[in-house]
Image: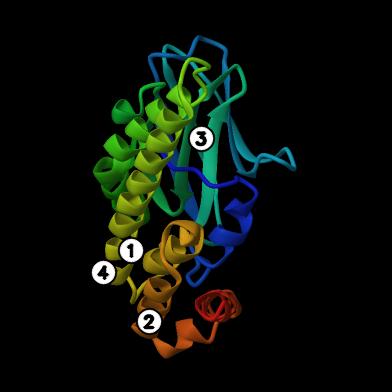
Amino acid sequence: MFKPNIVVLAAAGAMLAACRYNGYKINGNSHNLDNGDTVYITRCLDTGQHIDTAIVHEGRFTAEGTVDSTVFCLVYCPKQPKLTMPFFLEHGTIRMQLSDRPAQAYVSGTANNDKWQSLMAETVSIGIRIDLLAKQIYNDDLSHEERVEIADSIATLNAKFGKVVADRAKKESGNDFGKFLLLYYSNFIPAQTIKEIIATMPEETRRQPDIKRLNNECSNEKHK
């Protein structure tokens, strides 16, 4: 999956606080986890502050609690770094499967997580191809021309991914999920496209500080 620096989780998730919620429940499973493993839910890996934890039993884990607003989070197991899952912590029952194979990992059960999983399913093959190419580019046996060719292929795939995200953000521009996509994946979307999507958002959204800042940054980029 595409995961920008996890530091942005708190900032990108904070804008989803328009509504008040209460209870959440996470039902998770993974064939890669052992009995007694601890799974953590956090908004930011750098701070080490956890929203919740769960102990794995027979490949399953459960977490329950309350949350005042929808927050973009990450669930992970320190023992197995590949088992990470970005998701929306929000009211309702959230189902997830952690896997070291991206195509087998999923999250669903609530409105934003269903949308998130739909996007991940559409882009997972792009991410896998980029990962494979990124590993090849460090091969010492490659010539300069071969490295350039791989780099060009990665750039093409990044652009393809950006178009998928941009199209989804356009479709969701009237709600918080569209705003989240625009902020979280802004590095993958051309500045002019971002400005066009912002122009279709409700006026109240366009006046919000993070959207105004992004719009100004894109204007500056366009005039460089």
Give the quarter of the figure containing the C terminus: bottom right
Residue 68 appears anywhere in the view: no
Do the residues bearing badges 1 and 2 touch, measured as CB atoms within 8 Å? no
Q: Is residue 49 left or right of residue 112?
A: right
- Residue 103 position, x and y percent, is 29, 29
Q: Earlier in the sequence, mark 3 or mark 2?
A: 3
Do the residues bearing badges 1 and 4 touch, measured as CB atoms within 8 Å? no
Q: Earlier in the sequence, mark 4 or mark 3?
A: 3
131 vs 162: above or below: above
Name the disc covering residue 171, or none. Answer: 4
Q: Nearer the viewer, mark 3 or mark 1?
A: 1
Amino acid type of the residue that numbered disc 3 sits on in the rendered structure: Ala
Q: Earlier in the sequence, mark 1 or mark 2?
A: 1
Name the disc covering residue 166, or none. Answer: 1
Give the spatial CA distance, label 4 vs label 3. 32 Å
- Residue 170 position, x and y percent, is 30, 71
Other residues around mark 4 within 10 Å, as few (<14) / some (14–19) / many (≥20): some
Amino acid type of the residue that numbered disc 2 sits on in the rendered structure: Met
Identify the residue position indicated by label 3 in the image. 63
Give the spatial CA distance, label 1 vs label 2. 13 Å
